[in-house]
């Protein structure tokens, strides 16, 4: 049973998340021939205040880019 986990910063439209799930599912099915019913996809959304790069959270970067 393939399990694919995707972690994103939160804030995307639910339709975009659903499209991502569909495309990941299709890619796994196509690439390794896994039966569709056995494929699991988990999407985790992390608050932008909890995701940092270079000692700056994404929320802080967003705020700095507004200025």
Image (cartoon, rainbow, N blue to C red):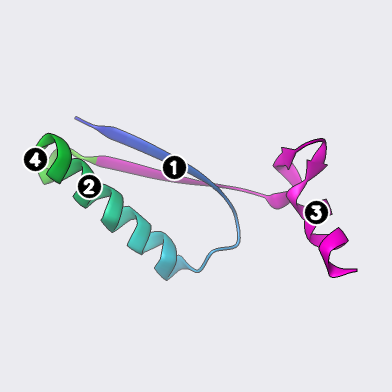
Residue at the (78%, 36%) spot, across then down: 54
Helix, strand or loop at disc 1? Answer: strand
Q: Which residue is mark 1?
A: 6
Q: Which numbered disc, 3 or 1, marks the residue closer to the eye?
A: 3
Residue 2 higher or lower than 63, as above or below: above
- Count of picture labels: 4
Q: Which residue is mark 4?
A: 35
Q: Mark 2 vs mark 3: which is more N-terminal? A: 2
Q: Which residue is mark 3?
A: 61
Helix, strand or loop at disc 3? Answer: helix
Residue range in magenta is 40-67
Residue 28 higher or lower than 63, as above or below: above
CA separation in Å, label 2 and label 3: 32 Å
Q: Which mark is residue 54?
A: none
CA separation in Å, label 4 and label 1: 20 Å
Q: Which residue is mark 2?
A: 27
Q: Disc 1 vs disc 2: Cβ atoms closer than 8 Å? A: no
Q: Residues within 10 Å of mark 3 (few under 14, many from 20)?
A: some
Q: Residues within 10 Å of mark 4 (few under 14, many from 20)?
A: few
CA separation in Å, label 3 and label 4: 42 Å
CA separation in Å, label 1 and label 2: 14 Å
């Amino acid at each position: 049973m393939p399990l694919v986990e995707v972690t994103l910063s939160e804030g995307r439209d639910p339709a975009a998340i659903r499209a991502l799930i569909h495309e990941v599912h299709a890619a796994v099915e196509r690439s390794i021939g896994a039966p569709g019913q056995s494929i699991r996809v988990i999407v985790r959304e992390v608050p932008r205040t909890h995701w940092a790069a270079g000692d700056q959270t994404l929320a802080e970067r967003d705020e700095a880019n507004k200025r």
